[in-house]
Amino acid sequence: MELLTPDFGLIFWTTLTFLILVVLLRALAWKPILKAVNDREDSINEALQTAEKARAEIANLKNENEEIMRQARAERDEILKEAREIKDSIVSQAKQAATNESAAMIENARKLIENERMAAVTELKNSIGELAIDIAEKILKKELDNQDSQKALVADLVKDIKLN
Amino acid sequence: MRSALISGLFTAVVTLFFAVSATAVTPDQQQHVDGHHDHEHTEASEGFDITGVIMHHIQDEHGWHLFDWGGHPVSLSLPVILFTESGLTTFMSSEFHHDVDGKVVVEKNGERFTYYHGHIYYANAEANDHGAFITYTEDHKVANAKPLDFSITKNVASLFVTVFLMLLVFLPVAKFYKKNPGKAPKGLAGIFEPLILFVRDDVALPNIGEKHYKRFTPYLLTLFFFIWFANMLGLVPFAPGGANLSGNIAFTMVLAAMTLLLVNLNGNKDYWMHMIWMPGVPWPIRLLLAPIELVGILTKPFALMIRLFANMTAGHIVILSLISLTFVFESFAVAPASMALTLFIYVIKLLVAFLQAYIFALLTALFVGQAVAEHDHH
């Protein structure tokens, strides 16, 4: 049972060496290593969280943008609608005005024509009157010589006059 | 984990069988003790002494035998440190001139020492009939007194090499993290970070719990890598490897004792309460449980000690036995089979080296976890 009998010397050296090793490695290796690994894990977690936050923010921004776009589109539609209405009303007003003016102008023209016609008729009447007087004068001059011929002439003249 | 435990137990049983059978064959060695034959003569007449060779390889020695050259052993001389009746005595192991049979006497400060199969004794004044300065008891044990031996033996030297290797590995790893904060690990750090995280996240954290695990992680890391490095170094077939350090009962005993201390010094009120007066069971059962629990304080680390010792020693014995097949059959034809089997066991041993370090650290973490756990049911 030689194998199962521990040697005092080896026990002593193992204890001493192992304790020194534990102290040495704890101070010089494990503490800095575990700290570095922990720090790195923390920073990775933090980075992941930041990325997540950024993603959420971007999604937010996108939503906001969409909202703004939607509003802009609605506003544009509104403006367009108004513009169309304004245009329509302007056009219809213009049409109305033109119609009115042309009606007035036509009215004026008609009045003018009427006036002109009346003037012409009056002048014609005057001319006819003068003509009749002239004729009557000439007839009178001629008939004064001869009674019969006067009568014949008057009859003839009267026959000739055609009052249109 | 359960299967690992079972395989560990299995190996332990196998080892004990080997160890017992090895000692049972020892009369072969005892013949040297009795001095009927001298060493060379025995080998010549009885063939290759496998048990002797294997036992020599798995045991500690003063000086580090490297190889034989032209029939002569070549060893690394190591310091012998003795506390004798008259104080401290030191000399180099080479002064024994490779003798293991107590035939060479080293005289220092008026005291005489001789080396007999791994141990240093006070030498007799006169050599016995066979040239050894040793007397025997009736059951063939050495009767001579032993000085207190603090020598740097092969295993102690191997221990220092292990520690040196660990510092060589982990100090640069730590330096990398100091130099490159927040960077991904590269090189050595890249190799060892997964293992460090493995110990932290799969050994310490789940067994000890969120609240306390940070306190014990450095110790568990040291323990795990210490055992693993020692195991791996023991698998290297030549110096500075090849010593059976982690298969030495003294080594495993110290680590188990550390676990015992760590667990019981950190045991909280609940731990001791559960030990002495188990809550939630009738009082006769409590009376029964208390001694069982108290014995458990010792049996848990004891199992740790035996498990590591048995696994590593068994592995060494199996590998050496398989290599020895060629010499047993005295035929080169056996060599390929012997090599194939050895290679197979070697690969398994690589796994076992890791597994045993893992189990030792895991069970230590588990026991510590039980000691610091806070129960909320009372």
Image (spheres, coloured by chain):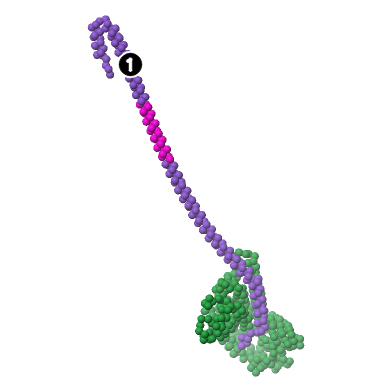
Label 1 chain ID = A
Q: Quadrant of residue B222?
A: bottom right
Q: Colour of chain B?
A: green
Position in image of residue A51 (x %, y %): 54, 60
Residue B84 magenta: no
Chain A tint in image: purple
Q: Residue furthest bottom?
A: B138
Residue occupying the point 51% across, 58% down? A56
Q: Is residue B30 visible?
A: yes
User: At 55% from the left edge and 76% from the top edge, which residue is drawn?
Assistant: B374
According to the image, label 1 marks what residue?
A126
> Looking at the picture, how far across and down is residue B150, in whole percent?
69, 83
Quarter where residue B108 is shown: bottom right
Residue bounds of the magenta highlight: A86-110
- Residue B324 lies, in percent from the top left, at 59, 83
Q: Nearer the viewer, residue B315 or A160?
A: A160
